Image: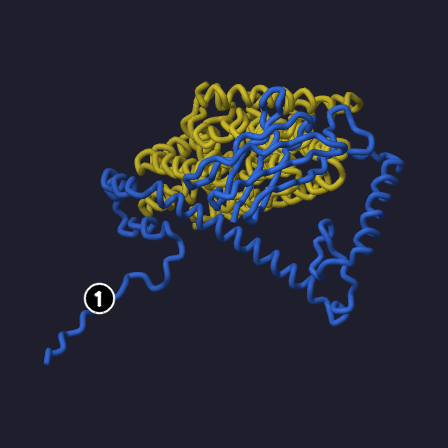
Chain colours: A yellow, B blue
């Protein structure tokens, strides 16, 4: 089976299993209109369910039944959706998975409350883990979840702070550290650590998962940033060029600022210093055109390919000795998949 | 006598400090002159090593992140271990669950702690809002406890045996592939046998007198469907 087909099949299978159980954890109770119907909104919109699938596949690659990892996977997906709701408020994003964002449709106060509720609801499957994994492993998963949430908040703080203060000297190393915390911890490191913890019954040092998760997650993030510029509008589900409009410090923007003339840099800084609504469509088009001119997009694509290669290497170091299985092949296919997806 | 040659002097470097960022040489701003660089030559220069530089930067970031984490853990550990002179007089609480730096506790204390742990687990099931504990009231999908393993080794050489059984629904009917040498050429060892016995499994490993020294690896399988149930590593030294 080709790798892309295998990845799609596994994402569908584990994603569907996660989705079925996730909806059982959403209360069918009042207040529906202002809370519980809305809590189900983002999960119902779909998505690839990459994170829960990574958790389940990792546990299964060690030989654990899917059932043992399923509640942790559900919790990861719920926290991811909760963070998306808050991210969309903080980024003033208008579209999510092809539809208006929660705060655009429901207003900021309700959106924040829905995100809070979804975060708290994500604790219940972790508490239910006790019946399946026992108290020791369940407590470790809770501790790991607390760490993941803290790392994610720190990463988000970097990005929000850079934008609020219009920080202009962000380096590539700064960017990668921000991505490590903001994207990789929830997106790849935590699911990988949880799958390893469950699959190995706590016998493997989880810090060994950080490198693989970082390289995989960073390649994923850069590809996501590239799709934000040049992706298929239907498949991408968010406004193209939204990152430029939101003033996000992407690898392409950092490269452009390194390569541009002094006059061009001043124009970019001036644009970034404006409020989001003041940035015009012409500004976005001009920045995109300058990125093309200076090869910033090709540059970022090459870095993403390099990081995917590093992820492949780290995968072999970490999981190479596991017995051959469909789940191991899925995990091995992910570095190539994250930079080829559209 | 050879006359001394004039000392070779290199021109002073343009930079005034160490290059801490591997991307720095490429990232030197050229735009101060106010004129755009030729994009074609710029692209050509960037293509050479872009990928490698990106990976190098990423490794530098993650290495620094890990180093800081390790230092923080070490500092925490040291603070924990230096909380005063009374530290020397503390009883030796420790063991696999408490990960205590004061050393192993006595056998009697270990047994007492284990009994307290079991009692605590049992009582917590009856507390309001509590869940049945794994292993006590098995849930529909919960796995059975890992079986105890008895190991019998027949060998004239010193041997280390490492058996890992993956979590799974059943440990009955296990068999083992031939033990093959890892990373060196040697004939495989004869398969180990795994027999079910009360409350666990019995593993028997035979090592021939002429077996080459080194590490041998085999997969443990379920006899019913040949699926992988674990791994066996035998190191002959």
Please identify the residue farthest to the bottom as the structure is shown.
B1
Q: Nearer the viewer, residue B102 or B226?
A: B226
Q: Quadrant of the N terminus of chain B?
A: bottom left
Which of the two residues, B175 or A188, is positioned nearer the viewer here? B175
Residue A111 visible in rendering: no
Mark 1 nearby-residue class (10 Å; few <14, some 14–19, many ≥20): few
Q: Residue at x 35, y 43 (%)?
A: B52
Image quadrant assignment for residue A146: top right
Q: Which residue is mark 1?
A: B10
A307 displayed left or right of A80: left
Percent of width and height locating residue B165? 64, 34
Q: Is residue A169 visible?
A: yes
Q: Residue at x 30, y 35 (%)?
A: A293
Tell me where residue A208 appears, x and y as whole percent.
55, 44
- In this picture, is A47 found above or below B95? above
Mark 1, chain letter?
B
Q: Is residue B39 above or below residue B66?
A: above
B34 displayed left or right of A149: left
The structure residue drawn at horizontal position 82% and vertical position 46%, both measured from the top left corner, is: B117
Residue B13 vs A337, above or below: the answer is: below
Image quadrant of residue A114? top right
- Can you give x and y, in whole percent of width and height, for residue A237 in the image? 51, 23
Place of residue B26 in the rendered image (x, y in percent of width and height, measured from the top left): 32, 49
Number of numbered discs:
1
Please tell me whether mark 1 sits on a helix, a strand or a loop: loop
> Which residue: 81% across, 56% down?
B109
Horizontally, is A44 left or right of A1 in the view?
Answer: right
Front residue (pair A132, B191): B191
């Amino acid at each position: 089976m080709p790798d892309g087909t295998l990845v799609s099949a596994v994402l569908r299978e584990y994603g569907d299993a996660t989705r079925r159980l996730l909806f059982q954890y959403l209360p069918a109770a009042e207040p529906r209109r202002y809370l519980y119907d809305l809590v189900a909104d983002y999960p119902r919109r779909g998505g690839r369910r990459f994170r829960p699938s990574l958790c389940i596949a990792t546990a299964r690659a060690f030989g654990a039944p899917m059932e043992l990892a399923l509640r942790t996977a559900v919790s990861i997906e719920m926290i991811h959706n909760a963070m998306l709701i808050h991210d969309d408020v903080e980024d003033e994003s208008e579209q999510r998975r092809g539809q208006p964002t929660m705060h655009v449709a429901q207003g900021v106060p309700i959106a924040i409350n829905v995100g809070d509720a979804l975060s708290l609801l994500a604790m219940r499957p972790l508490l239910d883990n006790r019946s399946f994994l026992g108290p020791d492993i369940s407590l470790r998963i809770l501790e790991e979840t607390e760490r993941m949430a803290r790392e994610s908040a720190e990463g988000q703080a970097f990005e929000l702070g850079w934008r609020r203060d219009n920080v202009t000297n962000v380096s590539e190393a700064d960017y990668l550290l921000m991505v490590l915390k903001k994207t990789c911890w929830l997106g790849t490191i935590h699911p990988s650590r949880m799958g390893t913890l469950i699959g190995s019954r706590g016998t493997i040092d989880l810090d060994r998962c950080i490198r693989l998760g970082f390289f995989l997650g960073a390649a994923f993030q850069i590809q996501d940033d590239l799709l934000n510029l040049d992706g298929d509008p239907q498949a991408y589900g968010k406004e193209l060029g939204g990152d430029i409009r939101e003033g996000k410090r992407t690898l392409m923007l950092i490269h452009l600022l390194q390569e541009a003339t002094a006059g061009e840099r001043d124009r970019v800084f001036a644009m970034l210093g404006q409020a989001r609504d003041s940035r015009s469509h012409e500004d976005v088009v001009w920045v995109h055109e300058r990125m093309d001119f200076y090869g910033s997009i090709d540059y970022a694509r090459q870095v993403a390919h390099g990081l995917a290669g590093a992820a492949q290497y780290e995968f072999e170091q970490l999981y190479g000795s596991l017995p051959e299985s469909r789940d191991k092949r899925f995990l091995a296919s992910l570095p190539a998949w994250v930079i080829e997806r559209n | 006598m050879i006359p001394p040659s004039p000392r070779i002097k290199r021109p002073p470097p343009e930079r005034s400090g160490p290059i801490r960022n591997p991307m720095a040489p490429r990232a030197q701003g050229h735009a101060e002159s106010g004129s755009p660089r030729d994009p074609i030559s710029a692209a050509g220069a960037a293509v050479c090593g872009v990928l490698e530089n990106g990976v190098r930067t990423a490794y530098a970031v993650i290495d620094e992140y890990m180093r800081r984490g390790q230092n923080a853990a070490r500092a925490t550990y040291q603070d924990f271990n230096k909380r005063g002179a009374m530290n020397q007089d503390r009883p030796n609480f420790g063991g696999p669950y408490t990960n205590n730096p004061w050393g192993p506790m006595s056998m009697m204390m270990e047994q007492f702690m284990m009994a307290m742990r079991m009692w605590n687990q049992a009582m917590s099931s009856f507390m309001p809002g509590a869940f049945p504990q794994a292993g006590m009231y098995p849930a529909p999908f919960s796995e059975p406890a890992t079986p105890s393993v008895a190991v019998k080794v027949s060998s004239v050489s010193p041997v280390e045996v490492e058996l890992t059984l993956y979590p799974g629904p059943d440990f009955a009917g296990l068999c083992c592939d031939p033990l093959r040498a890892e990373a060196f050429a040697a004939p495989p060892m004869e398969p180990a046998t795994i027999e079910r016995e009360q409350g666990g499994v019995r593993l028997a490993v035979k090592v021939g007198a002429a077996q080459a020294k080194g590490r041998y690896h085999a997969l443990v399988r379920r006899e019913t469907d040949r699926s992988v149930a674990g791994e066996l590593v035998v190191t002959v030294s």
